[in-house]
Image: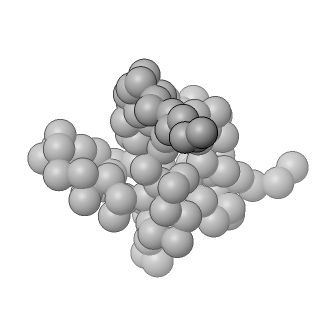
């Protein structure tokens, strides 16, 4: 079994199904916690990223064992950026029409 938490991106670790519109997916070279903090909303205010399994697994001195991580991922909840991606998908899309 491949250990998902060894993956590079948050959507791979969390097995996220909402990539379109996700701010982290659109900026794959930036850690998702930095993307979320830049939104400067409730995620920053409540320190949600510091409690996220993705953030915790990427810290050098993580207190979680590999077994802890696997257990958490098996029971994981929703990605902190998922609601942002879903909101993006609800927004009407403007389509440019070619001028004749």
Residue situated in front as seen by the camera: 64 or 73: 73
- Above-or-below relation of 50 to 16: below
Residue 75 % position (x, y): 57, 30
Residue 84 % position (x, y): 37, 36
Regarding residue 71, the answer to whether it shows in the image is no
Regarding residue 68, the answer to whether it shows in the image is yes
Tell me how the rendering is colored. one colour
Is 17 left, or right, of 58 in this rendering? right
Q: Based on the displayed image, in which of its 4 quarters is residue 87 positioned?
A: top left
Residue 49 % position (x, y): 33, 52
Residue drawn at the location 46% of the way across and 30% of the way down:
93
Residue drawn at the location 24% of the way across and 44% of the way down:
43
Q: Which quarter of the rendered picture does the C terminus lie within?
A: top right
Residue 70 % position (x, y): 65, 46
- Above-or-below relation of 31 to 70: below
Residue situated in front as seen by the camera: 96 or 52: 96
Q: Based on the displayed image, in which of its 4 quarters is residue 74 positioned?
A: top right
So how many labels did they put on this image?
0
| Residue that lies at the very extreme toward the left in this rendered image | 45
Residue drawn at the location 25% of the way across and 59% of the way down:
38
| Residue that lies at the very extreme toward the right in this rendered image | 1
| Residue that lies at the very extreme toward the front in this rendered image | 100
- Above-or-below relation of 57 to 17: below
Is 34 left, or right, of 40 in this rendering? right
Residue drawn at the location 17% of the way across and 44% of the way down:
41
């Amino acid at each position: 079994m491949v250990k998902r938490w060894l993956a590079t991106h948050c959507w791979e670790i969390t097995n996220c199904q909402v990539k379109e519109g996700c701010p982290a997916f659109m900026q794959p070279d930036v850690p998702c916690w930095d993307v979320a903090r830049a939104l400067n909303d409730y995620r920053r205010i409540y320190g949600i990223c510091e409690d996220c399994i993705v953030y915790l697994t990427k810290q050098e001195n993580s207190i979680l064992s590999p077994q802890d991580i696997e257990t958490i991922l098996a029971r994981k909840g929703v990605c902190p950026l998922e609601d942002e991606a879903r909101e993006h998908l609800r927004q009407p899309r403007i389509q440019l029409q070619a001028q004749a």
